[in-house]
Amino acid sequence: TLLGIALSMALLAANLGSRAWLYMRWKPIGNMFGALTPFYAYCAAILTGLVFPFMGFRQIQSGGAPAIQTIMINCAIVAILFVLSDLNVVQGFIFMGQACDQTTTNIVLGSWLAMAAVSSIFAARKIEKPETVENVEGEIDMILDEDQTSPVGYKVPNFPDYCIDPVRFREDGLSCFSTNVQTFLGIVICLGLGAFVGSAALVDYFKFE
């Protein structure tokens, strides 16, 4: 039913939104609304998940170019899946009887996908990488001691069993371009993917006319 679909989408958006809230290091809501605080927090998580859905992925913690690359890849995957779902062959396999009309859905989704990806790209640019220092030889020193018993191979001597997430130190991305150039490319690609999703509906519309 539509109610079940709406609840599922709300739960997914709340999950992505709460993770995005954490990764963007926003301040907690606190108990400012009294007994209604959980409800307001849930609504805020849903809204954040709809505006910054791609910020809820774990790889976003690396920030900069790697985070922008993650957003572009996930945006492309979503666009391809929705375009494929509009094919008559796919709809005939999933639905019994007459195929459903996705014209309005594709236009709305294409617009939302482009805007959400662009907003996530700008938000990802503000995520700071973990602090590091350079030793006297100019090499990056993570202030770690090598320890074979650690899952990541290192431990912080002053903080035993301190959790270090390797994903935060990713350095991939298009190394030949600056972060500003990759931001521009990400915006162009994500807007193009959104237009691509919406164009699938327009093609069917003009054919019908």
Image (cartoon, rainbow, N blue to C red):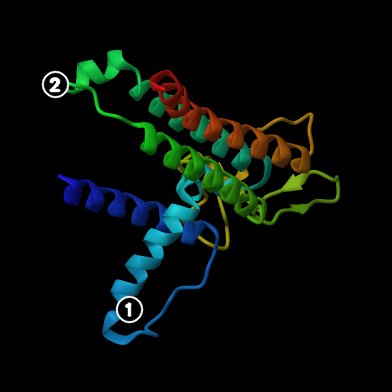
The residue under the point 67% across, 40% down is 65
Residue labelled with disc 1:
37
> Label 2 sits on what residue type?
Met
Camera-side residue: 6 or 71?
6
Q: Position of residue 146 (x, y in %)?
A: 59, 43
Is residue 31 in view? Answer: yes
N-term-proximal mark, 2 vs 1: 1
Give the number of marks: 2
Q: Secondary structure at mark 2?
A: loop
Dot label at residue 96: 2
The residue under the point 46% across, 45% down is 57
Dot label at residue 171: none
Tell me whether the residue at label 2 lies in contact with that at label 1, contact meaning CB atoms closer than 8 angstroms. Answer: no
> Label 1 sits on what residue type?
Thr
Extreme-front residue of the structure: 209
Determine crowd level at label 1: few under 14, some 14-19, many 20+ residues with C-alpha closer than 10 A: some
